[in-house]
């Protein structure tokens, strides 16, 4: 009898755990995933890049988020009708092709290879690959100095590949799953520089804890034209382009840039013209 | 403790042990002091970095709890799918027919020889290439697939060991009253083996929970460990603080599971109605790699 | 069909796996034996430390330990274990992490080995006037090691598989190469089969050989 009880008890525990996680799993994404009806719009953003797309206790924040919210509004969706989804760099094309999201604003650079698979609206921001350095470090003055430096970047990112293949093939590269993991090492001198797009770097440098501790190298190593990705052949492309134009002309673009990158002493490029892709 | 190994302590031994204690304590303290002072020098102990976890609940509800839910979801799904598979494989390995026994043995040995991470990476690519599972769910599917493939083989061994641990008299008596092989397994051996295996299954959960962290670090599965990444992005790169909190949570969760398993084991051993056959916590460590060495001897030093 | 394999350093990656496994095995055997000695020894503080160490380490995912060696020890505390390029720093950190983790299991395997040594052995040794170090080092441990070959072999096999976790901090071993190959080549099944085969080659003979050794050296009672 006792054994029965134990078995029953553990079965109950298991069942409880299951239901708990099952229920939690559903509302964890912030809303029902019933795709029926067009009362919702699904947008792909980054969840872990402060300044561009970051999950916060109050919701989502960053420049990409502001742009996406503005565009969604012009498309006829209020803020509470937006469903945010995390789109990791490697997943972006597939997510669009499969229709998991309506559009993606996630530090998404327009490149010829990607244009074969998806369509881009924009660009809405011109960024450059750059390095983040300690404020008191004068060792790295030009891109050539990177060759004998210790760099940190994200595993498999375009910036990491650029460094290895052309920018500084001799540099040592420490890969981590996220950029924030690079920051303690940069702070403590275990690495000399963190490299990725200057917009992303500016987002980190702008955080409260890091004021005055880091500086941007300002090397403009590459041109990254951030666009909004849509499914190939989608009619959303023209509507989004129109929305982006309005965002620049009514000053919301400028405000969003100042708000998200302002404190980082990051000199942003002027708003790019739609369809003007710098290579 | 194992006082058989040393004599009752006289005055000299006591003095010597006191010296050892002091030296060891000093060494430990020096190590701890070095860690703390260096962390302090590097500004990692600043209250601002740790504050999110101790004041307010937003860090917990936004990042940690969803991550923990995913960890538990993957672990529980893996156990539930792996158990029946493991039972079938384990019973198949005990079959009298070589054509059942040998293939089951090969499958079990093969999947126990391969790292879970390799199975997970394989699963992720498999779902991306050959199915239309959405990118949101793919990491979960991949993690569960890897865990199931590995743990089904481990559970197969647990089932086999559980059945073998039953006293021989059980099957002899069942055969004597004319039960067929299938009845013997279904009515006599399995029900008793399941109770004997319960502690071992619970401790296997610890192994599974630990392995889910691989999914977070390598496969972008948003579990507890990965939640530290998103979280440290928001709280000013408090990487050390976030990872420490996550590590403590893992320890607490697994410690609870281990204690539950030991409690179950002790209870089953004490129980008068059982056959006394129990597959304990320690057996699981063995089964996770190779052959089962039989019940642990506890009557030694 | 196997052409693309020539573009990748498959043998090199598995060689790294083997190096990780061998170095960590030696290290964790030493540290694990010390821990086991602490756990059965007469000094209460060391006993407590050994018990706490084993209970904590066994309950942390190895992934967390390895990430901690990199993010905590190296990047924050500035420990680089005498190396100065990331490749060797990460390799050494991974070995350290594997040792810290595996030694807890070595300690438990040895302790269960010590439990198989009959009480009379230690009693006889004490009756001869041997002290704790002598009882443990000359009488109990030699017998315990012989009966722990089986459990220790299991720990070693688990260790060989666990070396893949070093991929989390970018050590170029087999699992990391597998991930890279899958991303670049459309040969999923072939790549997986090759990597799986590599691990079977490493683990199966180890298990069989040590199983044979274990039977050979076992103390007949």
Image (cartoon, rainbow, N blue to C red):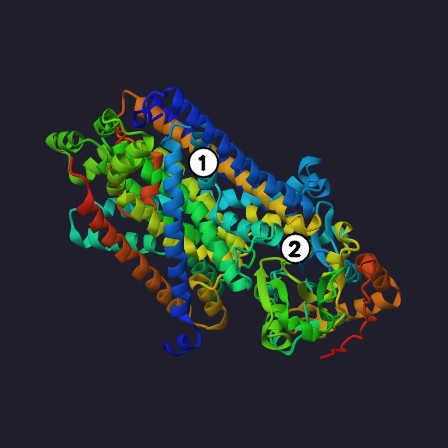
Q: Are marks 1 and 2 in contact (CB under 8 Å)?
A: no
Q: Tell whether A22 sits left or right of A67.
A: left
Rendered image quadrant of residue A150 = bottom right
- The one nearer the camera, A169 or A87, is A169
- Name the residue rendered at 56%, 56% in the picture: B136
Check the picture and name the quadrant holding the C terminus of chain B: top left
- Name the residue rendered at 36%, 41% in the picture: C33
Q: Is residue A72 visible?
A: no
Q: Is residue B139 visible?
A: yes
Check the picture and name the quadrant holding the N terminus of chain B: top left
Give the residue at the far right of this rendering.
Answer: A250
Q: Tell whether A109 sits left or right of C136.
A: right
Which label number is shown at residue C55?
A: 1
Mark 2 packing: few (<14 Cα in 10 Å), some, or many (20+)?
many
Q: Chain ID for label 1? A: C
- The one nearer the camera, A209 or B134, is A209
Horizontal and vertical percent position of residue A18: 49, 39
Which residue does the numbered mark 2 point to in the structure image? Answer: A180
In this view, C191 is above or below B221 = below
Mark 1 packing: few (<14 Cα in 10 Å), some, or many (20+)?
some
Q: Chain ID for label 2? A: A
- The one nearer the camera, A74 or C196, is C196
All told, the count of numbered labels is 2
In this view, C203 is above or below A167 = above
Horizontal and vertical percent position of residue C172: 47, 64
């Amino acid at each position: 009898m006792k054994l029965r009880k134990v078995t029953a008890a553990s079965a109950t525990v298991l069942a409880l755990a299951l239901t708990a996680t099952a229920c939690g799993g559903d509302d964890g994404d912030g809303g029902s995933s019933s795709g029926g009806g067009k009362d919702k719009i699904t947008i792909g953003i980054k969840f872990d890049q402060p300044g561009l797309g970051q999950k916060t206790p109050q919701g989502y924040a960053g420049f990409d988020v502001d742009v996406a919210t503005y565009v969604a509004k012009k498309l006829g969706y209020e803020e509470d009708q937006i469903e945010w989804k995390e789109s990791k760099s490697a997943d972006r094309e597939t997510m669009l092709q499969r229709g998991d999201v309506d559009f993606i604003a996630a530090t998404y650079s327009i490149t010829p290879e990607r244009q074969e698979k998806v369509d881009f609206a924009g660009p809405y921001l011109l960024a450059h690959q750059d390095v983040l350095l300690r404020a008191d470090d004068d060792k790295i003055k030009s891109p050539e100095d990177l060759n004998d430096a210790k760099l940190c970047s994200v595993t498999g990112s375009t910036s990491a590949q650029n460094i290895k293949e052309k920018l500084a093939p001799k540099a040592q590269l420490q890969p981590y799953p996220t950029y924030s993991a690079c920051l303690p090492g940069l702070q403590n001198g275990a690495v000399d520089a963190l490299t990725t797009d200057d917009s992303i770097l500016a987002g980190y440098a702008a955080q409260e804890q890091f004021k005055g501790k880091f500086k941007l190298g300002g090397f403009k190593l590459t041109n990254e034209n951030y666009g909004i990705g849509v499914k190939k052949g989608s009619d959303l492309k023209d509507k989004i382009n129109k929305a982006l134009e309005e965002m620049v002309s009514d000053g919301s673009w400028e405000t969003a840039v100042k708000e998200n990158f302002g404190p980082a002493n990051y000199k942003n490029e002027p708003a790019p013209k739609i369809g003007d892709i710098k290579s | 403790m194992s006082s058989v190994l040393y004599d009752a302590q006289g005055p000299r031994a006591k003095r010597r042990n006191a010296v050892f204690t002091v030296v060891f304590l000093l060494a430990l303290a020096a190590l701890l002091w070095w860690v703390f002072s260096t962390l302090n020098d590097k500004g990692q102990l600043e209250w601002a970095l740790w504050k999110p976890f101790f004041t307010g609940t937003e860090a917990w509800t936004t990042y940690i709890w969803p991550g923990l839910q995913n960890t538990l979801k993957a672990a529980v799904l893996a156990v539930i799918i792996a158990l029946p598979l493991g039972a079938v494989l384990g019973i198949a390995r005990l079959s009298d027919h070589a054509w059942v026994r040998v293939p089951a043995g090969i499958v079990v040995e093969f999947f126990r020889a391969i790292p879970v991470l390799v199975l997970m990476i394989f699963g992720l690519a498999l779902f991306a290439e050959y199915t239309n599972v959405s990118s949101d769910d793919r990491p979960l599917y991949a993690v569960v697939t890897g865990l199931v493939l590995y743990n089904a083989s481990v559970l197969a061994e647990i089932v086999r060991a559980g059945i073998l641990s039953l006293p021989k008299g059980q099957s002899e008596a069942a055969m004597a009253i004319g039960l067929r092989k299938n009845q013997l397994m279904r009515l006599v051996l399995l029900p008793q083996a399941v109770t004997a295996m319960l502690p071992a299954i619970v401790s296997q959960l610890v192994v599974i929970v630990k392995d889910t962290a691989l999914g977070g670090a390598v496969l972008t599965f948003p579990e507890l460990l990965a939640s530290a990444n998103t979280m440290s992005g928001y709280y000013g790169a408090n990487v050390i603080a976030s990872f420490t909190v996550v590590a403590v949570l893992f320890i607490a969760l697994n410690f609870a599971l281990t204690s539950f398993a030991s409690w179950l084991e002790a209870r089953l051993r004490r129980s008068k109605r059982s056959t006394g056959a129990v597959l304990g916590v320690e057996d699981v460590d063995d089964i996770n790699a190779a052959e089962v060495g039989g019940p642990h001897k506890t009557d030694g030093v | 069909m196997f052409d693309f394999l020539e573009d990748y350093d498959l043998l090199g990656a598995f060689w790294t796996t083997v190096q990780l496994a061998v170095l960590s095995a030696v290290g964790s055997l030493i540290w694990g034996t010390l821990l086991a000695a602490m756990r059965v020894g007469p000094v209460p503080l060391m006993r407590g430390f050994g018990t706490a160490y084993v209970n904590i380490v066994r309950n942390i995912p190895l992934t967390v330990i390895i990430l901690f060696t990199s993010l905590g020890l190296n990047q924050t505390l500035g420990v680089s274990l005498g190396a100065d390029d990331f490749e060797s720093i990460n390799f050494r950190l991974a070995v350290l992490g594997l040792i810290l983790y595996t030694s807890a299991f070595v300690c438990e395997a040895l302790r269960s080995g010590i439990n198989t040594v009959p009480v009379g052995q230690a009693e006889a040794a004490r009756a001869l006037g041997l002290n704790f170090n002598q009882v443990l080092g000359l009488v109990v441990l030699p017998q315990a090691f012989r009966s722990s070959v089986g459990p220790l072999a299991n720990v070693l096999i688990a260790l060989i598989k666990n070396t893949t976790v070093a991929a989390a901090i970018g050590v170029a071993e087999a699992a990391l190469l597998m991930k890279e190959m899958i991303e670049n080549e459309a040969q999923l099944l072939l790549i997986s089969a090759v990597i799986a085969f590599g691990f079977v080659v490493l683990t199966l003979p180890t298990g069989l050989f040590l199983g044979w050794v274990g039977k050979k050296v076992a103390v007949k009672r």
